[in-house]
Structures are given as C-alpha cells and as structure tokens.
Amino acid sequence: MDFLDPVLAGFGVVFTPVNLLYVLAGVVIGMVIGVLPGLGPVATIALLLPITYEIPAESAIIMLAGIYYGAMYGGTITSVLLRLPGEAATVITTIDGYQMARQGRAGSALGIAAIGSFIGGTVSIVGLTLVAPLLARFSLGFGPPENAVLAATGILLVASLGTVSTAKSLVAAGLGLLLAAAGPDPLFASPRFTFGNINLADGVDFVALAMGLFGLGEILYLLEHRVRNRLPKPRVSNAWPSRQDWRQSRGAVARGSVVGFFTGLLPGGGGVLSSMAAYALEKRRSRTPERFGRGAIEGVAGPETANNAAATSSFIPLLTLGIPTNPVMALIFGALLLQGIPPGPRLIDENPEVFWGVVDSMYVGNVFLLILSVPLVGVFVRLVSVRDSILAPIVVTVTMLGVYTVNNSTFDMLLVIFFGVVGYLMKKTGFEPGPLVLAFVLGSLLETAFRQSMRIFDGDPSGFLTRPISGTLFAVGVLVLLVPVGVRLLRRRRPATGRPARDTATEEVPTPEEDLAPEQRTPTEDSAAGRLTAAKDSAGTGQRTPTEDSAATDSKVP
C-alpha cells in the first residue's frame, strides 16, 4: 500500500480542473501538429517553452508530455487518408494504411491505430509506474564517474543510432558541447567563450537555441522544400475495426506494446525506430508476408502501437537518470531546468507531485486521445489545407515574441535568428539538429562530472573502469556502438555470388520514400528517410525481392 500512496496522490494532482485542462490542451495540440507535416512535437515544444515560465511545473510538463504522445497519433490521420505523414514516426504507416484507405477501409485503419495507440500507451505507462521508482533507487548510488560515463554514452548512442550519418551526427554533437562550454566555468566561475559580450556571461540561452533550431529553422526549411500532394481524400465511413480486423491485429498490438516500451528506453530510440522495428517484426512473423504493402492491417496496428509505447517509455531515463534519449526529451529536460527542478533520481523524493503528476496524467491523456481521435478526423484533415504563406508568419511571430518575453532581451531574439539560420543550413546539408541539442543539454553534466571524477582519481582515467557501475555502463556503451559496425563489416564481406536462399526474416521493409517521386515528398519524409535507412541497416535487413518490388509498385499513388 505504501507504493500506491504516491500514485494515488499523483491522480489527485491530475484531477484538478486546471491540470485536466492542460492534459486536454496538450493532447489536442499534439494531434493538430501531428497532422501538419513539418511541424512536429520538437518544434512545437520548443515554441511553447516560454509559456512554462508562467505556469506551475507539474502543469507545464503535463502539457508538454501530452503534446508528445498526442502527435504520435495525429500523424496517422494524414498518413492513412492522404499518404502524407505528419510526423516522422508515422512514415511507416503510409505503406499499408494508405492502401487500406484506397480499398475503402480507412475507418478500420484509423480505428485500429487509435485502439493500438491507447493500449500501447497504457501498457507503457504501467511499465513506467513500476520500473521508474526501482531505477531511481538504483541510480541513487551514482557518483560523478557514473554520471560522466552515462552522459557520454547517451550522447554517443544518440549520435550513432538516431540519424542519417554517424560522422555528421558526431560533428553536430561536438558543436553542442562547444556551445555548452560558453559561459562561466562550472568549478571556478571564470568566463569562457564569451568574446567580451556581457550577454553571454551566463552562457547560451537554451530557449533561444531550441526555438531557433527547431522553430525558425524548421519554418525556413519548410518554406523552401515543402510541396503538398493534392490527392483525393478517401471517405471515412465506419471508424471502428470489425471483429475480423481485431482478430488479425491483436497479436500485432501486443507485440508492438513490448517492442515500443523497450525501444523507447534506448538513446536514439523513440517513435521512428520503434515503428520500424514493429513493422519488420510483423512481416517476419506473418505466414503471408506478401500481404504487407497491399493493405495488411497488422502493418498499421504494430507500428502505431509501438510509437505510442515508445513515446511514454522514453520518460523513464529522463525522470530517473536525468538523461534525455531523444530531442523531445531534451526539450522537456530544459523545461524542468527552467522551473528549477533538475530531473534525476531525487526527483521522486524531492518533487513527487511533478513525477507522479506527469505519470498519472498519461493515463488520462490516453483516454482523451482515444475519445477525440475518431470524431475529429474531418477537422484534422481540413488542417492540411492551411497554406504555408499563412502558417509561417504566425509561427515566426510567436517564436520571436515568446523568446523576448523570457528575459526581455533583444539579444535573445538575435540568437534565435542566428540559430534559425544554423538550423536551416544543417537541415539543408544533411546535419540533424537533434544531437546538437542533446549534447548541449548534457554538456554541463558531462563536464562537471568528468572534472570531479578526475579529481577523485588523481588524474588517472582508468578509474572509470575500476568502479563497478561506471565500468559496466562503459562496457555496455562500447558494445552497443560496436555491434552495428560489426554487422556492417560482415555484410560488406559477404560474397557477391552464392547468396543464401531468400529468408523472410531479413526482408527489407518497403518505405514510402521509395514509391514517392522526389517532388512529392515532404520535409518530414525526407528527414525520416535516412533514419529509416539507418534503422534497417542496424536491423540487418536484406535485399528487395521481385515480389516486394511488385508490391511496392502496386502501392504507388495513381
């Protein structure tokens, strides 16, 4: 019963009228921005960071969390109806979801996506409720060496697993560490890298950095590259799956919940990798894999369940270890710091209303998501028709006003413009801003913990390996980094002739990027294509077969 007391107290925080309103607002905003291609949860949370100054900490994080898992389902609607993924994690849903819509089964696809998202999110929340307190107690034994190894491993794993090019990701992470070093020295408080500018005496402002890279930068890239598909909108007659649909997809929902939960725990995991892994698993297990790509409902149920489960479980490393595993978690990490609440193992004891309020709000948010997802389909589809010439000026105005209200500083507005241009150039040249922000957030923790550790070890770096926890974390990080490299080397050494027989367990999962012409792709699809390719490489996928090629051809938009 002692365990249930804080959980019930968290529901007391959630079921206040104000916090219920924030849960609802977060879910609705998340669904809306999930529908709009180019405006994902990262950009939206970055734009809303200034608002978190004016509301209580638990309310702010409850709303931001609702935006995240709400966006996971919002992108499903246009993926199914228009073959236009509104969020990177729903790119895989376009493969079978759009084919179901063309066959007159759009309602079944949307219905099973809503049910799967609800079940996957709920299973992951239960896991979060049970696992997070245990992990927090374990991490109380962490000292500076463990924190240093954990932060370094998190940065390296995100850079190597979560983006297109490992080299470019490491460069972006290095730039983030350099920006984190600007400002006062953490041990001696002497100014560094300020170039004599008093506005940089406290370092680079996180809000200006995030709003520039993800807000203004995304808008600039969107205006240059976004071309909308003018496709006929399939009608949604019955948005509830039949008994046959449920029998076919219930196994996929169960497996997607497990895959998403564990994938969300990994640095660099999140919705894209989890949905990709769930789709590959369903195709591997199927007795009729040729159905995938032609309207298999399992190809919608598995990925949609997995991405919502991953969105929830990614809060576990953030709230218990203070380590963000993806860009969204990095922004929520920054929102907690803006409230003066450092996330980590002491969060449960020192701020239980924040921890349990956020966890319990996800139960309520998933119920809201299930209730709202079907009735508002028509409204969300109409949002796609909003012109860029209207959307872009509104977002830019909100961005500049929001960052000014934080510190009443025009210098912060200049920083937003600077980082907006940097973010645009990074996207244009193939550099993802995610590793930069993660490295910026973890840079201070890494530097402080590393320098404290070197004082403890009298300058001997081998001390990191002699301590049990830090040595184990170091070994796990090295192992995870080397496994993908080893897999790629083995595949390159495979002889060009004499290939083994076709194995459905290693089939390549077709992606919508292969079917769409370059001028039809959205920026969301462009940025997600590389991540999907990287995920396929790490999963050891094989070559396309003529059967798959014909299936991909059949699934093209007429």
Image (tube, helix red, strand yellow):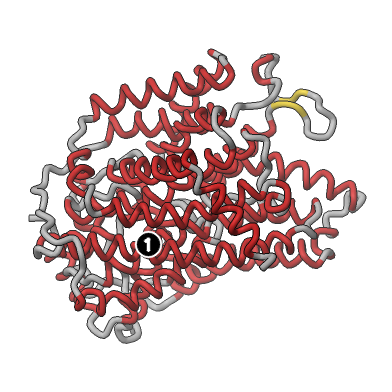
Quadrant (top left/top right/bottom left/bottom right) for the C terminus: bottom left
Residue at the image point whose x is 74% and y is 52% from the top = 147
Position of residue 36 measured from the top left corner of the image (x, y, whole percent): 28, 41
The disc labelled 1 sits on which kind of residue? Phe
Q: Is residue 461 visible?
A: yes
Q: Which one is nearer the viewer's eye here, 316 or 466? A: 316
Position of residue 458 measured from the top left corner of the image (x, y, whole percent): 92, 50
Residue beneath disc 1: 118
Residue at the image point whose x is 33% and y is 46% from the top = 31
In the structure shown, which secondary structural element does the residue marked by tag 1 occupy? helix
Q: Which one is nearer the viewer's eye here, 124 or 396? A: 124
Above or below, 438 relative to 319: above
Please, which residue is most extreme toward the right here? 458
Q: Residues within 10 Å of mark 1 (few under 14, many from 20)?
A: many
Left or right of 445, for residue 170: left
Position of residue 142 measured from the top left corner of the image (x, y, whole percent): 78, 57
Residue at the image point whose x is 60% and y is 43% from the top = 439
Residue at the image point whose x is 42% and y is 77% from the top = 494
Q: Which one is nearer the viewer's eye here, 335 or 202? A: 335
Left or right of 476, for residue 497: left
Above or below, 448 relative to 316: above
Above or below, 414 relative to 503: above
